[in-house]
Image (tube, rainbow, N blue to C red):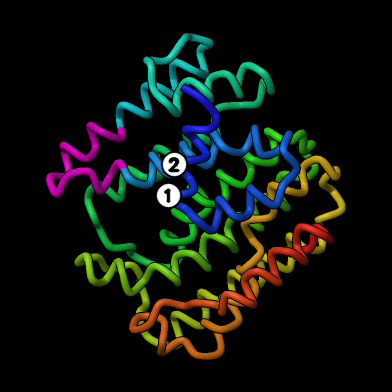
Amino acid sequence: MSLHACAALVEAGDPDRFAAAMAAPPAARARLWPLYALNLELARAPWASAEPLVAEMRLQWWVDTLDRIAAGERPRTHEVAGPLAELIAETAQPVAPLQAIAEARRRDCWGEPFADSGELLAYLAGTAGNLMLAAGQALGAPAAAYPALQDAGLATGIANWLVAVPDLIARGRAPLPDPGPDGIAALARTGLDHLQRARKARATLPPSAIPALYPAWQAGALLSRAAADPGQVPRIPLRLSEFSRRGRLLLTAATGRI
């Protein structure tokens, strides 16, 4: 069990979040790796089996593990659970946001479509929003900064969801409650609204917690592209050029702006 193992998992399974963490100072990085590795484990668990009950059993292992960590108990030996428990013990941050991510992921086990945009937004707030909140808490963000973290996390979640739409459709899922251009554009604009709110409230975060926002470095550009050309979202994965990606991440790391 080590931070190196967590970092390796993130590098292989979530390269964008890995790049964002690598742009952070080493001390911040050490606190982010267990959280990002946990997020990857929770995202993968529902896809572990085509049988929903089996997939939910895999996810339940993590629900139980997080409950043990929250109770101050030693988790079962695992390359992510161990470093995560050490992080929680060090920071004394609440486990509730991580538990909420796990619970939100239950619906992925069953593949049920979202009834409306409200359900989708609640799911993305429960997953991406809580992950960015937990990252900020690990880096010392005060309660006054929680809304900014959740707004930035939700905006990032919407952007990443729109990127994933073609793949989810190919897997037989119905990722959008309103798959028409108007519905997609409205979802992208909602993401932009939350991103703007996060930008306005960025000053509530101390410098130590700013790296928690780094995963939002592409969100504005991706959401703007989806809002401008929503018809491409179900057909072609949204992508920025490598030059644009690198430039935006460098700018975010240098200025803290997303």
Q: Quadrant of residue 80?
A: top left
User: SS of the residue at dot 1?
Assistant: helix
Q: Position of residue 42 (x, y in %)?
A: 39, 40
Q: How many marks?
A: 2
Labels 2 & 1 near each other (Cβ < 8 A): yes
Nearer the observer, 180 or 167: 167
Seen in the picture, residue 203 relative to 6 is either above or below; the reply is below
Q: Residue at x 68, y 55 (%)?
A: 214
Mark 1 nearby-residue class (10 Å; few <14, some 14–19, many ≥20): few
Q: Residue at x 44, y 81 (%)?
A: 183
| Predominant SS of the magenta segment | helix
Q: Position of residue 146 (x, y in %)?
A: 71, 44
Seen in the picture, residue 77 relative to 193 is either above or below; the reply is above
Q: Quadrant of residue 119?
A: bottom left
Q: Which residues are magenta?
A: 45-59
Is residue 250 in the magenta section? no
Image position of 191 (left or right of 71)? right
Q: Amino acid at mark 2?
A: Leu
Q: Which residue is mark 1?
A: 12
Is residue 48 in the magenta section? yes
Q: Amino acid at mark 1?
A: Ala
Q: Which residue is mark 2?
A: 9
Q: Position of residue 177 (x, y in %)?
A: 35, 71
Seen in the picture, residue 18 relative to 156 is either above or below; the reply is above
The C terminus sits in image quarter: bottom right
Q: Residue at x 47, y 78 (%)?
A: 238
Q: Position of residue 161 (x, y in %)?
A: 44, 65
User: SS of the residue at dot 2?
Assistant: helix
Image position of 174 (left or right of 142)? left
